[in-house]
Image (cartoon, grey):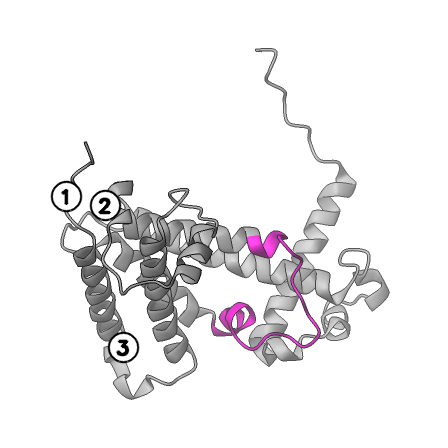
Amino acid sequence: MPAEEHPMATPTLRQRRRTAATQEILDAAEHHIAVRGPAALSLRAIARSLGMTVQALYHYFPSRDALVTALVTKAYDDLADAVQAAVETAPEDPALPRLVVAAEGYRRWAIAHPERFQLIYGTPLRDYAAPVDGPTTQATRRMSSIFEREMFDGFTAEQLAAAETPALSPSLRAYLEQLPHYGFGHLPPASTALLLSAWGHLHGLVVLEVFGHTSFLGDHQAEVFRMAMRTLIEDIHRRIPAHVSKPR
């Protein structure tokens, strides 16, 4: 065995039991949210459903905020898994952009898990604040990287920098310059502005549907969403020049 390789240590019985109990608590909390909604999250009710005391639950999650953070992180990760799986398992179809496939994976998960979607994107829970640069932030970065990759894959840095957008104010341009990115590394301000605009459009349509505001479309909601996403990506790619002359 090479010197740099080390066998994985087998978890102890105590560690396995703790992992199993932690997952059982998370499952119970997700069920509680699905039945009563995120705002009604109650540690006492969750503990009661598992036949344990609140004090015993605190051995696994020392506070309500710790449990909420775990639930939010898991929801983001499950959503990102669904989006990534949609992209990876979609049949090759040059006529269907991968960003549309990713967006449809996002929509399907949100519709299938409306309460968990509301937990991460609905009204913030009273008195809860996510840890700064904590696990919830890491999870959102993963989601950002997927959409950034699918939106701009195949374009050079020069093309992205030359994207056509309405004139950006100097202060906005400076702010976009320093924003972190997780798909391509640094994105020019023009492309960042396109990404944020597209995200708002995509997410807004999903929120409207999850909250029942597009129910008047009936069975046509999926078709309308796909049409909107096709138009979105066509507009973005139309704004990125096919060729950029490099300065001599």
Q: Amino acid at mark 3?
A: Gln
Q: In percent of the image, x 18 and y 60: which residue is there?
A: 234
Q: Position of residue 123 (x, y in %)?
A: 56, 77
Disc 1, SS: loop
Label 3 belongs to which residue?
221
- Gap between marks 3 and 1 measured at Cα: 37 Å
Q: Position of residue 165 (x, y in %)?
A: 26, 61
Label 1 belongs to which residue?
243
Q: In this rendered view, identify the residue nearer to me: 136 or 78.
A: 136
In the displayed structure, 38 sits above or below 136; it is below
Q: Earlier in the sequence, mark 3 or mark 2?
A: 2
- Gap between marks 1 and 2 measured at Cα: 7 Å
Q: Tell me if 43 is positioned left or right of 68 in this view.
A: right
* Residue 80 placement: quadrant: bottom left
Q: Earlier in the sequence, mark 1 or mark 2?
A: 2
Q: Which residues are magenta?
A: 114-137
Label 2 belongs to which residue?
159
Q: In percent of the image, x 70 and y 54: which residue is there?
A: 22
Whether residue 229 can be seen here: yes
Q: Is residue 208 magenta?
A: no
In the displayed structure, 90 sits above or below 194; it is above
